[in-house]
Amino acid sequence: MLKKMVFLGTGGTIAGTAAEASDNVGYTAAQLGVGQLLQAIPRLQQALGPHAFLAEQVVQVDSKDMGWAQWRVLAQRIQYHLAQPDVHSVVVTHGTDTLEETAFFLSRVLSKKLLAQKAVVLTCAMRPASSLAPDGPQNVLDAVAVAGSAEARGVLAVCAGTVHSARDVQKIHPYRLNAFDSGDAGPLAYVEEGRVRWLHACPDADAAADFPLKALAKDPWPRVEIITSYAGAAGAIVRALCADAAVQGIVVAATGNGTIHQDLEAALRVAQVQGVRIVRASRCAYGGIVAGVAEGDFPHSKGLPPVKARIALMLELMA
């Protein structure tokens, strides 16, 4: 049976255009369909090798505007395709701004059984498709190489020839082509001239039970907000959030090893008594909170950065 590689488009810079080819900043994202993007890559069929391909436009947004509605339909479409016996893997073209959030979300909600057998690879671009030197086509070719690799499984991200896990990937630069990093964990692999050089095995899915995908149909999704602790931080923002009964959780991007300004912490304790779930994460780019202060009243995020800790808490509340 000829196995298919499915390409799902969501918009982003990779599908963006600008009035001038020299403009890599003043572009409009999400202007081209995924079919158009693939047609513009001459070596795509060669890179696919024995695989046929299917392209589907799932949503079309600037990834800064990615939200629950887009995540819901994307997860449903990926789950559908992964479940088809003639589908080998799925490649998702995505904007860079929220790629790390979408990747982590998908890794938590998609079937663990399917992710243990097949790969979902997110890729992107830092320059629009109209650029004099767009990086999107090469990123797609690299994603195809990874998706076709026998070692690939789970949710992965590929950018600038580097392969990251969904749990660890984070955007660390606003402009350069190599905009992503995996923190202390380091990358999983590099793509070199169409060949994947694996450094580490793809991580196993979390041991927790499968997320009930039907729960994504609920509206509205649990509202979880992120606040930051900093010098002079006050509790007013916490009190303002808690005035809205829809807020069910707050992730605090704490300083250092999970420390929180005393005024902010006092307001968070009141919120917790009122039934709002509080999770502390570190605002540091590397490392996670080490047990100690994390053993206090607010549970820590188990190494997740604030944006991913928010998704984890939201899904916990939802399920």
Image (cartoon, rainbow, N blue to C red):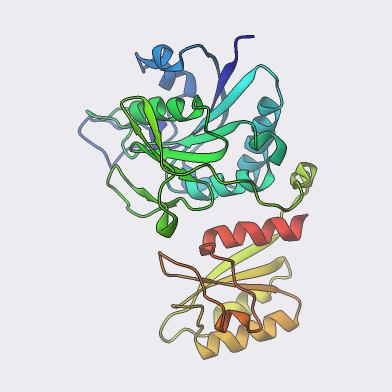
- Along the line of sight, the residue nearer the viewer: 70 or 138: 138
* Residue 122 position within the rendered picture, expressed as x and y whole percent measured from the top left: 49, 36
* Residue 239 position within the rendered picture, expressed as x and y whole percent measured from the top left: 62, 81
- Along the line of sight, the residue nearer the viewer: 319 or 268: 319
The residue positioned farthest toward the left in the image shown? 22
- Give the position of the N terminus as an image quadrant: top right
Identify the residue shown where x is 47% and y is 48%: 64
- Along the line of sight, the residue nearer the viewer: 18 or 147: 147
- Give the position of the C terminus as an image quadrant: bottom right
Quarter of the image for residue 125 reads top left
Judged left or right of residue 174, residue 51 is right
Judged left or right of residue 267, residue 51 is left
Identify the residue shown where x is 64% and y is 58%: 312
Q: Is residue 116 above or below residue 247?
A: above
Identify the residue shown where x is 35% and y is 15%: 43
Quarter of the image for residue 315 reads bottom right
